[in-house]
Image: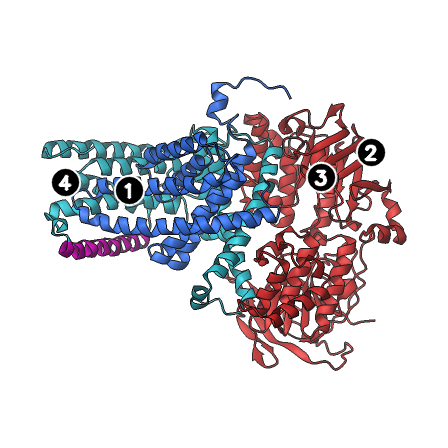
Chain colours: A red, B cyan, C blue
Amino acid sequence: MLNVNGLSYRHAHAGRPALRNVTFALGPGQSLLLTGRSGSGKSTLLSILAGLYPHFLKGSLEGQALLDGKQAGQDRVTEWGQGARLMLQNSEAQFFAGTVGEEVLLTLRCRGVTGAQADEMANDRLGVMGLLNLRDHSVFKLSEGQKQKAVLAALTALRPKLLLLDEPSANLDPLFLSDLKSVLKCLQKEGLALIVADHRLYWLHDLCEKLIVLEDGQVAFEGAFGDLDSDGLRQKLGLRSAKAPKPPKLPGPRDLKLPSAPKPQTSAPTPTPAPPPAPTPTPAGGAAPQAKKEIAVTVKNLYFAYPDGRELFGGLSLSLAAGEVTALTGPSGRGKTTLARLLCGLEKPLRGTITYDGQNAGLKLGQVVLQNADHQLYMPTVLSEVVLAIGEGRQSPDIKARAMELLEAFNLAPLADRHPQSLSGGEKQRLVVAVGLARPTKLLALDEPTSGLDGHNLTLMANEIKKAAQAGPAVLVVTHDLELVNLCADRELELIGPQALKAQIAP
Amino acid sequence: MRALSRIDRHRGPGRLALKSETRLLLMVVASISSLVLSEPQALAVLVSFSALYAVAETKPKTLLIAYLFMAVMCSIALFFVWVLGFVFPLMRSSALSMAISPFMRLAVTMNAMLPLALNSRLTDLAMALGRLRLPGLIRLPLMVTIRFIPTILNDMIQLREAVGIRFRGRKGFLFWLRHPITWWRVFFQPLIVRLIRSADELAMAAELKGLEPNTDFGGQPQTFSGYDRLTMLLSALAMVLAGLVQIAIGSHWHA
Amino acid sequence: MATKKLTWNEIWNGRGLFETRELVTIGLFSAAAKASSIMLALIGGGMNPLTLILKSAVQSALLVVLLAKVPKSGTLTLSNAIGMLLSFLLMGQHVISFPAVLLGTITVELLAHFLGGLARRPWLAIPMIASSELLVRVINVGVSYLGVREQPGLLAMVLIVSAFSYLGILLGLAGGLKMTKELRRAGLIQD
């Protein structure tokens, strides 16, 4: 069905080719995992297979990409797209209509299907995705997982033969990932061929049978998914683990006092792909081994309320020690980011206190690095970005020297003169963390610092987080990424419900 | 999404649940006819009818606030005229009947605008536009504009927050007044970067979806309700009546 | 890909003039201009001089970047048309001045086209925006005169507002030009 033969592609004005001599084949109902380091050419390959060359990608192409005998680039995107559909990483950017149903109908109208037939086809797809009850729901009010399924409903409405997915796991928690996997399995049973380009690998086990690893645009490895069990291979190619990460067995935060009602429990569903062994709750956190460390942040009897009246945390108390990394985990929408924002003074608690060494919490002493690095980079060079953070408009040789020291600590010194927006995703993430540490801080909170990072960059980031903690502040990492937690966290707090927490004692 | 709910939070269907097309049509008719008519009596007819429409479609409290706002703006404008009257005697106020016409025009436009602005959700307006036979050249970018205003507002809120975090409590007005170039850079540069990235991504999504300038965005054809027809009939009646008054008063016809 | 002759219907729908992705980009920049106006009005109030200047500065800087991203004849006209239609839809503004402004902007575009066009002479973006924005303000003052013709003194307020906003346009042109250079350096706008 799909035959890629000696495919090479060079972006316009680029020195090196983005793809070199890529060859593989895929039949109906088969699925392929496409992985490799950031910038290895995965997205370019997907774009070509989606028909975006030459209309959108204006470089030069050699070799063949044949879908049912038709060569990519010979049809307009619209016609080619009837055979192959691509799901981009940012699902919200793919919605053009206001409601879930209208979005699917719009896709059908774009291909000339209207009236009762369109209605029937839309209902069928929404049914497969489990979204029929959300047909008239605004697309803005969907969760990230529902958004992805709405996009999938629209993409598969006209029954394409090949579905291409670009980093579908980047913004999803483990619960939504397993839901997405079930949907993809359904589509596979319908005879749809799948190519999934992703960095997170474990969730694709028993979905993708074939494997291609790209490096510098070339096929560095081709085989079966099971080949990823080899540690040597993964390390050599800079890949993440292919097995579900072990649930971290870390102690809960110091002086943890769990909310009184409902009881801290073990019965609530644990959203990790492989549920941890029955956790032992630490009602007062007192049983965990607690070495003497300076307490940087103290939370007492914390309550928070959203504008609509929903309450969170139910009287949470805990302490964060200087030099320690605490991971805040749990499914989406349970208040992880809200807790981090409260601790940094970005939100006000309903009741309770948050103090840094006895002083009230606030942005003067706490620092939070948000998820979107683009929003946090302003200056024309990497160096001036850090200088701005240290000096806030003032400049001096001293400030510049301190900025260079910080860049060196984060392996960014060789990029000091580059424009921050020209850096790769991983480099930008490291730069915003460096900026977060530019001035003395009691608490550094990082919101999903590794979404979309490959194995190599994940390890780098984990090391930087540990270094950041050694520099003095308490570090709080809000994350779905259990691989990161295993690599760098000292303690873990899992939020599993509006007023339910879970913490464990170290073995 | 926070930004969208901020915009659409108070946008209910309106008491008469009129179609967006009806509200758009009334807005165009009110703007043009109020500009063409010049006699205060003729404008008074339009003010009365449009006020009825506004009262039927808008909450009294909102209407009152809008009128108070208009009164403040008009007072400021009159204050300017009074001051200018000392410098340029020719600009001193003439007869009250002549001075009142501009404000009556403003009232007509505002009465027609309030139901549209408060009761039509952006998504409904976008759909209504899709059903109009505008050239695709305008329809596609206009649809994208309406669809993405909330997304960009949301981006701006995040951006403001990121700046607040970076400048740790020094984001006061005086700080930015002392550093206008830094202000421009920290607020504007990330917005532009985000826009350019989103434009590329969105354009790719549009091409993949098969979206063309002539794509029919409109969805199901709309049927006008009894209220829609009655509102359109009454507005036609108001225009005829106002036109007759203008002619009967027999003064100038300004086109 | 085989090329075929365009029908009137296709030309009406913009095929051959703009590609879908260019129309999407124009739409997105118009959304940003409107969103920043809403945001600045919410923060600083609609009528204070600083807000007026900032709103116009952001608007013209966005136009400079847009013309660098889509350097085609018609981009400016289309962007102005979308902006005015949106003001009409949201606030009932510009319905009367719409045809005149459109005609004025098309004239500016035609002049630029005869001078070599944006694709060959990118610097033309600056005089194009400066002159079309001036024209828009002159036409708006004219239409406002129609509305207050019985009491011309009321026009003073319109003139003051127009002057402040045009000052913002000029400042935004400088800021937009600098930003465009930097975006090219970052590789976000291709030459």
Name the secondary structure under disc 4.
Answer: helix
x and y, in percent, of residue B176 in the image: 45, 64
Distance from Cα at disc 2 to Cα at disc 3: 15 Å
Q: Residues within 10 Å of mark 2 (few under 14, many from 20)?
A: some
Left or right side of C72 for A268: right
Task: Name the residue beneath numbered marker 3.
Answer: A44
- Give the extent of the magenta segment: B62-87
* Marks 1, 2 in one chain: no
Distance from Cα at disc 1 to Cα at disc 2: 66 Å
Task: Name the residue beneath numbered marker 4.
Answer: B41
Q: Is residue B75 magenta?
A: yes
Left or right side of A229 for B159: left
Distance from Cα at disc 1 to Cα at disc 3: 56 Å
> What amino acid type is highlighted by mark number 4?
Gln
Disc 4: which chain?
Answer: B
Disc 3: which chain?
Answer: A
x and y, in percent, of residue B62 in the image: 32, 53
Q: Is residue A494 magenta?
A: no
Q: Earlier in the sequence, mark 1 or mark 4?
A: 4
Q: Quick check: can you spot residue A483? A: no
